[in-house]
């Protein structure tokens, strides 16, 4: 099934046949935030995605292309997804019902805090490693593909798609290689890695891409006189 | 005859005779570099192993980040260590993207990074010694094609050692200044076009001024916008316009060299007062689905009758076909054409998509200029062969299929009437391959493979001899994440040689080999191990009688070779980036009676460690290497001895303002102990001594000054190598002083001039001393 079709089925977005019209896109006002260093840019936004800045108390609607700063949180609602591009080129994709907090770089280490939900990351190998913190353990990454889930009960599950990740907390650490997963529960050391069949897992992250706002459907019909009539139907995402 | 073979091992060249089947891709061990200095060339090094199935070619692909099209260099090898240089002109403030590609004789290739290397290559951040900001386009990837709805332009900014005046930052898309609609921070700039960008090539560029007034500009990155085809696209819908792209690099170099003295022994070094001209041109481009690339290296160094130095290659390719013209290494099976440079043409047709059932047909024709064993390289035309080869491969599933190969090599010179010349001969080889692969999980796979070959070698026109050969190899390989693997292989090779004119030359021989390999690789530890057992009866002439060098009549026999080697590399601490240890054990023995002709043992050990400390704007690094080898010959010659080598090298680099200083030095001591060498051998071979200690000292100093950052840089260097021994047999001194500079008219045009003075003195053999001065100019243009 094409990725786009999977995404359409997943998202449940309504596609209606409407007359062609212009689609207004949100745009970023020209802004300069010299005081802060941006750490990520929201490059894909599907459905309801919200941002809470470090100084604000309320969640606001996210805008595609906006730059996020240390302390900012991003949340995806039900049937929504998002993708962030970090300043080093690493790509983070968030599944639905996920909350992630961006942290400032400390001691040459970049850190993200996954509070709830499910993210997939393709991390660019750098001198300084990326750490993804969960309520129960930290994943230290040096160039790899991985997925992390944090359940409501704070059980953190690390799945390594490629490369090697160190999964650690105060009680212990394990090295998790590709096609293995480890789980960590608060108050317990991370579990020993177990091998998994990656083919059996949902590759939800493959569908975190924007689809065209409009498409054209061309239909050829033969009328009762035997003449071919062409019908152009244009539809747009709502 | 046996020759005294003590193998000098260095940290970079531990003898690892790793063999892999033709269908198993080579293994690349490469620690990606992370940083480089603006405008300074970068040496890329990797350990690549592919043993019995030799590595056919290793190429480095690189480009300034944000530009289209990779340039490529063929990496040169020293043992299993491959090296190539990214020229300083490609090391721009935007950084450098690069990846490595290694291919073996069977065409199996691998890359570093292992997956999707072209789209997601290694990235080298560039630190400007003058601290200028560096830019990098994060989205869309430069050179990528994206639908308009996915265009989010994101540029990462690294201010380096300076502070930016963000009010001066300007973002251009094409020629349009879109800064007003962009979000700008000190580290990232993002922009989402309010309306879909038009289909076609789009350029992105950033300029900014630092707070101390220095202007900085990114390269112009390009990406292509292309509307995706809808599932219901009408037949009459207009196709997207093809983008014609042409880019490349031209480097012309002219060198004038003169020797103050030209003794016969140094004639190979240089011709007196001669122009040495070199021209390098790399071009590539794209037109719709058609890609092309051209690589030319032309030099006046080429000499008639020797291996060709000039290289020319043109390639045109799409997803389904590829045509190659010029000098190239065709990729065939292990028992077919292997490691042969062909000057001619080739075509490859592919049906099917990667990852699905597919079929390939490849045909190659041209001349091969490999040396023929046993004949002198400089014999007139003795290493010219015409070559024709074809290969047909069918894969029913990825990694599972059959292939047929045929090749014929015919002596093109037929210079039997000339001294050292060759005689008419033709060689035909046909092989059949089968392979099976199962991928259990994305990280685990198993391969099973086999190849059978039949050869017919005909010299019947002259010496009335015909050789028929058969060979088989088969094995299995288990691979798991990150290039780790274990492999077992069995080979059997046999031949019957019949000479009607000289029956006493007729012989049968066969060889059997078993091989076990282990590759354990993760980010901080590499373990490579290899065991190879070879048994043959190469000496088994049908007469079964051989007279050895001492005049004894012996019979037999079968030779057994055992070779075990292992290499461990680890990166335990940030300060000590590399520790390596290698060991090589080999033995060789025959069953000749009454006296063994071959009976020797080799044991070699190699240890190395490197450390680097960054301190502010400087770096101190040191490398320590120790190698020891012992050779025992228990056969007639009784050649036995030890070679021990110690090496310590250090480097100090310091960056101050627009200056970069480096100072290095090192000492290597070789200790030879040949206590067991027979007196008769000493008399025969002359220079061989019982005990000798040789010391080599190397000193170098270099200064690099960015006079006008980004425009004019000058470079001065000095290097001194001196060697001496305790017997007075060696007293060498080689000194080089160079002074040069490069001026860039624009970021894409540069002109360089270098003057070098070289002096060599040999106090033992003064006739070998010489002096030389070299002037070279070079002009480079990127387009």
Image: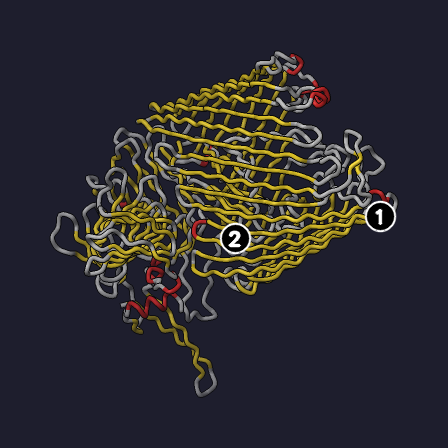
Say which quadrant the N terminus of chain B sits in.
top right
Q: Secondary structure at mark 2?
A: strand
Q: Quadrant of residue B401?
A: bottom right
The answer to which of marks 2 and 1 sits earlier in the sequence is 2
Which label was assigned to residue B568?
Answer: none
Please give the name of the residue rendered at 18% of the width and 47% of the height, measured from the top-left corner.
Answer: A71
Considering every residue shown, the one lying at the far bottom of the view is: A224
The residue wearing badge 1 is B460
User: What is the chain identity of the residue bearing mark 2?
Assistant: B
User: What is the chain identity of the residue bearing mark 1?
Assistant: B
The answer to whether B454 is drawn above or below residue B783 in the figure is below
Q: Position of residue B118 (x, y in %)?
A: 46, 49
Crowdedness near tag 2: few (<14), some (14–19) or many (≥20) residues, C-alpha within 10 Å: few
Q: How many marks?
A: 2
Please give the name of the residue rendered at 72% of the width and 34% of the height, measured from the top-left corner.
Answer: B377
The answer to whether B725 is drawn above or below residue B631 in the figure is above
Q: Quadrant of residue B175?
A: top left
Q: Position of residue B564 (x, y in %)?
A: 56, 41
A26 horizontally vs B496: left or right: left
Q: Secondary structure at mark 1?
A: loop
Residue B182 showing in the rendered view: no
Considering every residue shown, the one lying at the far right of the view is: B501
Front residue of B240 and A48: A48
Crowdedness near tag 1: few (<14), some (14–19) or many (≥20) residues, C-alpha within 10 Å: some
Q: Nearer the viewer, mark 2 or mark 1?
A: 1
Please give the name of the residue rendered at 61% of the width and 61% of the height, measured from the top-left corner.
Answer: B402
- Both on one chain, marks 2 and 1? yes
Q: Position of residue B153 (x, y in %)?
A: 33, 50
Which label was assigned to residue B287?
Answer: 2
Front residue of B777 and B95: B95
B11 horizontally vs A138: left or right: right
């Amino acid at each position: 099934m094409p990725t786009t079709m999977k995404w359409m089925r997943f998202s449940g977005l309504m596609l209606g046949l409407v007359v062609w019209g212009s689609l207004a896109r949100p745009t970023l006002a020209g802004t300069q935030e010299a005081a802060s260093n941006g750490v990520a840019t929201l490059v894909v936004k599907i459905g309801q995605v919200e941002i809470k800045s470090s100084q604000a108390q309320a969640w606001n609607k996210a805008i595609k292309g906006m730059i996020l700063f240390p302390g900012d949180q991003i949340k995806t609602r039900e049937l929504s997804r998002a993708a962030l591009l970090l300043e080093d080129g690493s790509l983070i994709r968030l599944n639905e019902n996920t909350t992630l907090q961006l942290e400032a770089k400390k001691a040459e280490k970049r850190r993200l805090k996954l509070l709830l939900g499910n993210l997939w990351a393709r991390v660019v190998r750098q001198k300084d490693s990326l750490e993804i913190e969960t309520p129960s353990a930290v994943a230290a990454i040096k160039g790899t593909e991985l997925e992390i889930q944090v359940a409501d009960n704070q059980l953190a599950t690390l799945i390594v798609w490629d490369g090697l990740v160190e999964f650690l907390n105060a009680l212990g650490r394990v090295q998790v290689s590709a096609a293995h997963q480890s789980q960590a529960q608060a108050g317990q050391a991370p579990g020993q890695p177990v091998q998994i069949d990656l083919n059996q897992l949902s590759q939800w992250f493959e569908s975190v891409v924007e689809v065209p706002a409009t498409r054209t459907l061309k239909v050829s019909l033969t009328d009762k006189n035997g003449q071919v009539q062409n019908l152009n139907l244009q539809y747009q995402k709502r | 005859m046996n020759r005294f073979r003590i193998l000098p091992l260095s940290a970079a060249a531990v003898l690892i005779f790793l063999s892999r089947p033709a269908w198993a891709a080579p293994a690349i061990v490469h620690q990606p570099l992370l940083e480089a200095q603006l405008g300074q060339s970068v040496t890329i090094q990797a350990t690549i192993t592919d043993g019995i199935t030799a590595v056919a070619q290793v190429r480095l692909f690189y480009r300034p980040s944000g530009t289209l099209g990779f340039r490529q260099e063929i990496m040169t090898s020293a043992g299993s260590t491959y090296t190539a240089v990214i020229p300083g002109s490609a090391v721009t403030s935007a950084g450098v993207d690069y990846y490595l590609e290694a291919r073996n004789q069977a065409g199996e290739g691998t890359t570093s990074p292992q997956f999707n290397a072209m789209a997601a290559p290694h990235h080298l951040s560039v630190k400007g010694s003058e601290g200028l900001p560096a830019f990098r386009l994060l989205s869309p990837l430069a050179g990528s094609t994206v639908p308009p709805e996915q265009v989010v332009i994101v540029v990462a900014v690294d201010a380096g050692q300076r502070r930016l005046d963000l009010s001066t930052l300007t973002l251009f898309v094409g020629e349009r200044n879109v800064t007003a609609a962009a979000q700008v921070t000190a580290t990232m700039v993002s922009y989402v076009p309010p309306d879909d960008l038009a289909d076609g090539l789009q350029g992105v560029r950033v300029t900014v001024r630092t707070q101390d007034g220095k202007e900085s500009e990114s390269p112009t990155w390009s990406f292509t916008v292309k509307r995706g085809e809808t599932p219901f696209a009408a037949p009459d819908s207009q196709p997207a316009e093809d983008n014609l792209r042409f880019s490349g690099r031209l480097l012309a170099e002219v060198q004038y060299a003169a020797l103050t003295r030209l003794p016969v022994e140094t004639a190979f070094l240089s011709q007196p007062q001669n122009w040495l001209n070199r021209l390098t041109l790399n071009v590539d481009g794209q037109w719709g689905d058609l890609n092309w690339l051209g690589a030319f290296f032309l030099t006046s160094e080429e000499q008639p009758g020797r291996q060709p130095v000039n290289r020319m290659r043109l390639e045109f390719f799409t997803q389904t076909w590829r045509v190659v013209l010029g000098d190239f290494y065709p990729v065939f099976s292990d028992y077919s054409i292997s490691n042969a440079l062909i000057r001619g043409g080739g075509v490859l047709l592919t049906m099917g998509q990667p990852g699905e059932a597919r079929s390939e047909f490849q045909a190659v024709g041209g001349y091969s200029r490999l040396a023929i064993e046993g004949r002198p390289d400089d014999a007139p035309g003795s290493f010219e062969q015409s070559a024709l080869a074809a290969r047909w491969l069918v894969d029913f599933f990825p990694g599972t299929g059959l292939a047929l190969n045929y090749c014929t090599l015919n002596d093109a010179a037929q210079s039997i009437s000339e001294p050292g010349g060759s005689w008419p001969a033709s060689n035909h080889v046909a092989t059949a391959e089968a392979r099976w692969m199962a991928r259990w999980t994305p990280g685990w796979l198993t391969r099973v493979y086999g190849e059978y070959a039949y050869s017919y070698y005909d010299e019947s026109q002259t010496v009335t001899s015909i050789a028929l050969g058969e060979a088989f190899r088969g094995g299995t390989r288990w691979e798991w994440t990150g290039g780790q693997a274990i492999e077992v292989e069995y080979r059997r090779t046999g031949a019957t040689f019949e000479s009607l004119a000289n029956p006493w030359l007729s012989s049968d021989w066969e060889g059997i080999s078993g091989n076990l390999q282990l590759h354990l690789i993760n980010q901080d530890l590499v373990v490579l191990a290899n065991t190879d057992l070879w048994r043959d009866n190469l000496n088994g002439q049908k007469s079964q009688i051989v007279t050895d060098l001492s005049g004894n009549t012996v019979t037999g026999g079968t030779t057994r070779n055992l070779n075990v080697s292992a290499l461990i590399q680890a990166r335990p601490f940030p300060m000590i980036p590399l520790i390596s240890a290698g060991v090589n054990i080999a033995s060789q023995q025959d069953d000749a009676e009454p006296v063994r002709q071959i009976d020797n043992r080799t044991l070699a050990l190699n240890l190395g460690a490197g450390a680097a400390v960054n301190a502010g704007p400087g770096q101190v690094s040191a490398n320590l290497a120790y190698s020891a080898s012992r050779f025992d010959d228990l056969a007639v010659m009784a050649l036995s001895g030890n070679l021990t080598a110690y090496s310590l090298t250090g480097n100090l680099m310091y960056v101050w303002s627009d200056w970069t200083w480096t100072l290095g030095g090192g000492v290597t001591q070789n200790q030879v102990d040949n206590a067991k060498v027979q007196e008769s051998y000493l008399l025969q071979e002359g220079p061989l001594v019982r005990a000798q200690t040789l010391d080599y000292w190397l000193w170098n100093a270099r200064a690099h000054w960015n006079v006008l950052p980004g425009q004019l840089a000058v470079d001065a260097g000095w290097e001194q190598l001196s060697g001496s021994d305790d017997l007075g047999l060696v007293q060498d001194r080689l000194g080089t002083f160079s002074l040069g500079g490069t001026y860039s008219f624009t970021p894409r045009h540069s002109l360089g001039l270098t003057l070098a003075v070289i002096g060599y003195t040999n106090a033992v053999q003064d006739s070998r001393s010489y002096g030389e001065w070299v002037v070279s100019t070079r002009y480079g243009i990127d387009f």
